[in-house]
Amino acid sequence: MLARRAPEIRAFAAKLEAADPDTAARAWHQLGVLCVRINRFDEAQEALLNALRGIGDCPARIWILDTFAQTLSGQGAWEEGRRVLRAVVKLKRAAGDYQGVAVSIGNLARLESRVGHAADVVSLLTESLKSLKGRIAATAELRLRTSLLDALLAAGLPATREAAHLRRLLRGLSPHYLLGYAHVALARVAAANRDRHSSGRELARARPYFKLRDQQCLLHYWEARFGVRPVEGPRAIREFSALFKAAGVVTEGEVMFWLLLADNAKSRADMKAMQGHLVTAARRAASANNPLWIDRVDEAYRRLDPEGFLEQLIRRFTGRSLAEMSRTVKEKVTVVFADLVGFTPRSQELSPEDVMRTVRGLFELSVPLLVRHHVRPMSYLGDGLLAIAQGPGQERRALSFATELVRKATLITQVREALGDRWGLNLRAGVASGPVVLGALGSLLKTEFAAIGMTTNLAARLQAAANPGEVVCLRATGEAARVRGQLELLVLKGVEKPVPGLRLAGNDLRI
């Protein structure tokens, strides 16, 4: 399994850092690529940051940044991923690395496909194939044309001509896993044309090229989707479950399989089975903390079970029911207030589009972390975020969320600097625990939840006392979470007496 190789590569890279930093950097890059492959995006980012530190100014640096963009896409940070990939494409074009351009454009197309921009993907790939004609290897062209065919299908545009082009390209290629994906795309075209026989034939052709477990899981899903493989009944479900278990990690094919079962159950009005399959899909997607898969589950929930979706969404962030959330109560919580330092004056120098992209990018970074640590978003305040953690272990969960968010923003800043961008995500956060009044504010036109009280004000003041890249919390909050930091007596605006606090920076952010 790929996952078993990660510790070996990590140990190899660490051992080489002092004696041969260039080779060590390339090993860190390979570890990052492997971690992306198995959806371990946090580990990938740490490895890639090590690679950037050691690689120096050479062509491999651009490829490391390309891989970093894939980690952002995998974490749902679409805006930052898009920003990095576009910059990487420009750098590769300037260097005359057209093969590299094709790879990065393929990654950009994949990102845009994930967020539903199929028509934009069609335009991007059509133009890219024209400009790269005769400059790239056949396998690179195959990847782009497969993505184009997928985008045409997603956009509801005619795909027959591109399918014929893809078939001609396949005839002259040596065995490669990309051929498997091409045959799956052709199977989808056949299915769209209601040609079940041709669809099954293309999927059978894909099978020899899919050696890895996640590829096999995806192929099994498409076989079930197009009626090639039985999907209903205890025996079929056991067979699929055994394959998913053997993969060792959650895969896209597994999540899509449970959603397929939910669709089938809804079509035969078996609501209990439908809800059970939706819950399984949601649980597996959440365990992988993969925003793309979570979005797909959410879309299925909205379509199949709107009431259940709202309840599931509330529980995802809070662990509580909608009924519990709707009550006005006084409760001890831990409040997180995060803010981009100096962004308001900086926004005067940016275009309106860049302002919104930056803010949207920050919030995209936050969502998977909110889910991971069961922290409830209360409001987005321009370039800031207010969130709370409730219940047992709230201090630890709130500080884990705040420190991870600040670390990721700092990481983004380092990547932007590597690309020559002078504007980073200079984030800081304040965290305070104490009583607040929780309830809903608004009217029939607009309602939102609020956390009112001195604790919320303290979190905002602590945030103002932090430097970029730091988290400042109440000492009591830090002690409850068992974190280390620099103890200070803080004089806060609007607070009568100095407040004991902990300043977390650098390695103290790893809790």
Image: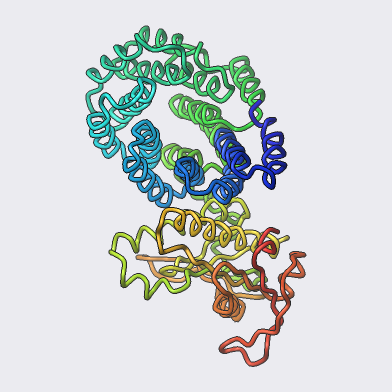
> Residue visible at 40% across and 7% down?
201
Residue extending furthest front? 19
Query: As rendered, which of 61 and 257 lies closer to the eye?
Result: 61
> Residue visible at 39% across and 21% down?
139
Residue 492 point in image, percent of width and height? 60, 86
Residue 299 location, quadrant: top left
Model colouring:
rainbow
> Residue visible at 45% across and 65% down?
380
Residue 196 location, quadrant: top left
> Residue visible at 25% across and 22% down?
159
| Screen quadrant of the N terminus | top right
Residue 283 seen in the figure: no
Whether residue 506 is situated above or below residue 279 in the rendered picture = below
Give left or right: position of 52 versus 351.
right
Residue 378 point in image, percent of width and height? 51, 65
| Screen quadrant of the C terminus | bottom right
Residue 142 seen in the figure: yes
Whether residue 263 is situated above or below residue 198 in the rendered picture = below
Residue 297 point in image, percent of width and height? 49, 39
Whether residue 189 is situated above or below residue 56 in the rendered picture = above
Whether residue 132 is situated above or below residue 229 in the rendered picture = below
